[in-house]
Amino acid sequence: MANAALLVICGDRGRREGFVRALLDTGWENVLSASSLADAAGVMSKAPASCVIVDAELRDIPGLAAVAILQQFCPHAKIIFAAPQNTLELEKQVRALNVFYYYISSGWNTYSSPEELVAAVEEATGAPRPPRARPRPRILVVDDDHDYQATVRSVLEAAGYEVSSAYSEPEGLDVARREQPDVILLDIIMENTTDGFEFCQRARHDPRIKHIPILGVSAIEERFGLRSPPDEERSLFPVDGYLRKPVVAADLLSELKKFLPERRHGHDGPGEHGPETGFSALRAGG
């Protein structure tokens, strides 16, 4: 069952992201997540999981109640129950549910790899296969300006990246789902003024691509006289980074490297220094 789908259900965002990151870093590729049992049901209807990590704290119902439902809903899945701390009463209740493994997640930082959890998942599903070779990280550029796309492509390819292009919000979402890029470079103003905002909202609610970092790049402040960049309004534009147009090549490459740690690619990664050409001529567009 190596590389079968894994599902993490946890209401606490920090722990949920920590679980997912630990599994991805260890080599599993198909790791899904949900904050509630209701969301998990929707995910599993499309991608049945061979192993489900259920946290004690979910958004809609207690984790203990969720386990019993999951055992009826997906009887073949191995269930690992996780809790931030243990009590004798909780342990008694968990043991009575006959879960595959009981994991206490306290005592480790969400940005580190919890070895005990990883070992339990490996026992449940088998060790992950070695990651598929990807010689160069892939960047998806979502921007309706063809000249800007051509310039960005030349800079990124010279710096060692693979580049995919999309020229609208719907096309960008389709390409992101299909190609699973390492980073999405996103314009805001395309066919409509709100296209970039809507792309972000849909991407962040899509379990297939919500884990992909998004770097916003736009001239919206200059065009509309905004006093602050749009990424300061996280509920409106939930990106991982933001640059104003016109963008200098060195600044773009430096920002991209923040989202591409070397350990993900098994090589030294693209260099920060590409062509000295900037994007200062590309003031048009959003």
Image: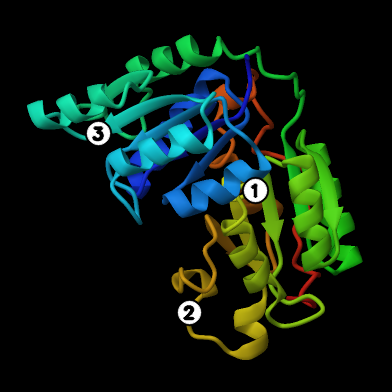
- Quadrant in the picture for residue 94: top left
| Residue 153 coordinates in the image, percent (x, y) | 84, 49
Q: Nearer the viewer, mark 2 or mark 3?
A: 3
Q: Which residue is labeled 1 in the image?
A: 209
Compared to residue 33, the image places residue 285 above or below, namely below
Q: Residue at x 76, y 37 (%)?
A: 159
**In the figure, residue 247 lies in which quadrant?**
bottom right
SS under mark 1: loop
Please name the amino acid that badge 1 sits on: Ile
Measured along the vertical axis of the image, is residue 122 above or below residue 239? Answer: above
Q: Which residue is mark 2?
A: 228
**Who comes first in sequence, dot 1 or dot 2?**
1
Q: Nearer the viewer, residue 274 or 57?
A: 57
Q: State the SS at label 3.
A: strand
> Does residue 198 appear in the picture of this structure?
yes
Quadrant of res 114: top left
Relative vertical location of residue 94 with respect to residue 152 in this rendering, above or below = above
- Residue 201: image location, x then y, percent: 59, 66
User: At 24% across and 22% down in the image, what residue appears?
Assistant: 95
Three-letter amino acid code at the position of disc 3: Ala
Question: Closer to the N terminus: mark 1 or mark 3?
Answer: 3
Label 2: which secondary element = loop
**Location of the N terminus (image quadrant):** top right
Taking 258 as reference, is 165 left or right?
right
Split into 4 quadrants, where in the image is the C terminus? bottom right
Nearer the viewer's eye, disc 1 or disc 2? Answer: 1
- Give the residue drawn at x 59%, y 41%: 44
Q: Which residue is mark 3?
A: 83
Q: Which amino acid, mark 2?
A: Ser
Q: Residues within 10 Å of mark 1 (few under 14, many from 20)?
A: some
